[in-house]
Image (cartoon, helix red, strand yellow):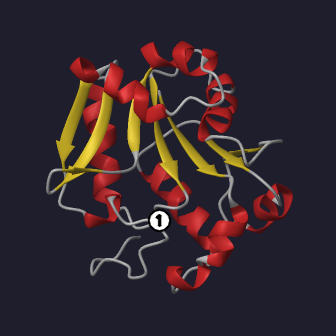
Amino acid sequence: MIAGILIATDFQALKAHESHLVPYDVFSTLDVIIEKFKSISCHPIITILGEESELICQQTNVDSFQCYANPDPQANTISSLKMAVNALPNDTIGFILAFAEYPYVRNDTYQIIYDTAINHPDKIIIPKFHEQRGHPVYLGKPFFEQLIQADNRYNVSLMFQAHQPVVKYVNVDDEGILLDNDDHQAPDQTWH
């Protein structure tokens, strides 16, 4: 089973960029990403939130996902990722990691990453658009323990660099993998 992990710990940053998510708000942005996980059969779906996590969980429209609050949302992403990995069932072969700051990724890109992970479950899978790496990424089970043991100052991209021989890049026709909320225009294609 392949899990979906959504990290959305910086609620204030998401709110600050909410006007760029037209016609969506923070809550529907999370719903959209969670629905993408559901559409490709990710299970479980785990969302790690920061401040105001109870409010966010109550206002999202999607059911059947696990919602956790990171007590230190200002910490590096690794602290949230550790929480999520620790919550994964033993039969999880890997997970797709998405960030709420990257809402424009198309459904077919999630499907490509998922299908590639089924065929290469022990790899790290990173999408590319015009030779630029983007989000979301997949990490196989061989990397779970390294993530759990990592210092909270650890940057996950260092893992990608250290394990280049097992990184598989997949080319996608989706500029959404590169556009975060700081990019003030959504891509021309629909992202839901």
| Quadrant of the frame with the C terminus | bottom left
Relative to the observer, which residue lies in front, 190 or 163?
Answer: 163
Q: Residue at x 49, y 49 (%)?
A: 98
Q: Residue at x 47, y 72 (%)?
A: 182
Q: Is residue 106 visible?
A: no
- Left or right: residue 135 versus residue 38 is left
Res 96 → quadrant? top left
- Left or right: residue 42 versus residue 45 is left
Regarding mark 1 in the picture, which secondary structure is present there?
A: loop
Q: Which residue is drawn at 77% across and 63% down?
A: 56
Residue 149: image location, x then y, percent: 62, 15
Relative to the observer, which residue lies in front, 11 or 58?
Answer: 11
Question: Residue tagged by mark 1?
Answer: 103
Q: Residue at x 67, y 23 (%)?
A: 86
Residue 115: image location, x then y, percent: 27, 37
Residue 173: image location, x then y, percent: 17, 60
Res 187 → quadrant? bottom left
Relative to the observer, which residue lies in front, 26 or 33?
Answer: 26
Q: Residue furthest front?
A: 153
Q: Can residue 111 be seen in this view?
A: yes
Residue 107: image location, x then y, percent: 35, 59
Say few, some or many: other residues with alpha carbon within 10 Å of mark 1 (under 14 / 14 to 19 / 20 or more).
many
Instruction: Tell me: residue 28, above or below residue 96.
Output: below
